[in-house]
Structure formats: structure tokens, C-alpha cells
Amino acid sequence: MSRLDFTPYRRSTVGFDRLFDLLENQTRLNAGDNYPPFNIERRSEDQYRITLAVAGFRPEDLDITAQQNLLTVQGKKREDAADGEMLHVGIANRGFERRFELADYVRVEGADLENGLLVIDLVREVPDAMKPKKILVGGSAQLKSVPSAKDDGEASAA
């Protein structure tokens, strides 16, 4: 098992302890677990999509929980009564728990199960109070919002 060593970075940074701990824990927790397989897609600057391959699971077998900075997806194993004797079981129907650490201000927008794929859409919504502000030099303390790159694109399209 490989271990990441962030000691050189810890010596020269302040306030990044949570990030380094998160990276070290993810390496340790996900060392051999690759079920169910998943994709993470960046759809735009502030939109993401997680797709999990959960063939054989029904919506009632899945539990999606969003907490602050953590998304947990659980699949509950169920016992189906087969009509006959199973000679080969190749479709995995084992329970699972998959955790995704979310950045600040990322929330779950929705989830959908179709054709054996669980799709979870995420969106990052930074509050106006946290967005960069332009401070004008002068006699009054006026603040002006700094337009983001996507705001510039929308203004030029109009």
C-alpha cells in the first residue's frame, strides 16, 4: 500500500491541514474498493455529475445522503426469490457504500436512476458574500462585485 507524504507541504503551508488529511484518508479508504464503478464529470464551471453503475438495484434499494461536504451513496443488498435454481450468479448484488467529499458550497441538485446508471447532479453555489469584491480607492467605502468569466460571456452575448 502506497502512502502519500505531505510533510514538506505541511511545513510551508498554513490552514491546509484538512485538505492533506482528506487526501491521505481517501488513499487509505479507497485502496482496494472499486465497486460500484463510477465516473465524475465536470459539466460546466459550477456543475458536476457523478454516475455510478448500479445494475440490478432499484430506486428503493439506494440511499443517497448529502451532508456538509460529504455525499454518501449506499446500496442495500436484497434477496430475490428466483423461480428456479441459479446455476451462475454474475451480476453483483452486494451492498455498498461510496463516499464523495464535496467542496464548500457544492450541493446535490438531483438524482436519477435509468438503465442501471445512478446519475447525481451537483452544483456549486458560492454565496454573494463570498464572491470577490472590487474595492474602489477614494473617499467612500463602496464595494463593487467583480464579474466572473461566465458573467463577461453573458454580457457580451447580449
Image: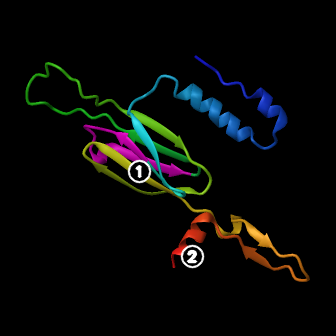
> In this picture, is 58 found above or below 25?
below
Image location of residue 23, percent across then percent down: 63, 34
Name the foreground residue: 148 vs 16: 148
Magenta segment range?
50-67
What amino acid does circle 1 point to? Answer: Ile
Q: Quadrant of the N terminus?
A: top right
Q: Which residue is mark 2?
A: 155
CA gap, disc 2 to disc 1? 30 Å
Tag 2 near tag 1, CB within 8 Å: no
**Residue 90 position by quadrant:** top left
- Residue at the spot of label 1: 120
Label 2 neighbour load within 10 Å: few <14, some 14-19, many 20+: few
Classify 139 as above or below 19.
below
**In this rendering, would 37 be left or right of 78?**
right
- Relative to 61, say whether 83 is above or below: above
Q: For the residue labelled by badge 1, is the local secondary structure a helix, a strand or a loop?
A: strand
The amino acid sitting under disc 2 is Ala
Depth order, front residue of 154/88:
154
Mark with earlier residue (2, 1)? 1
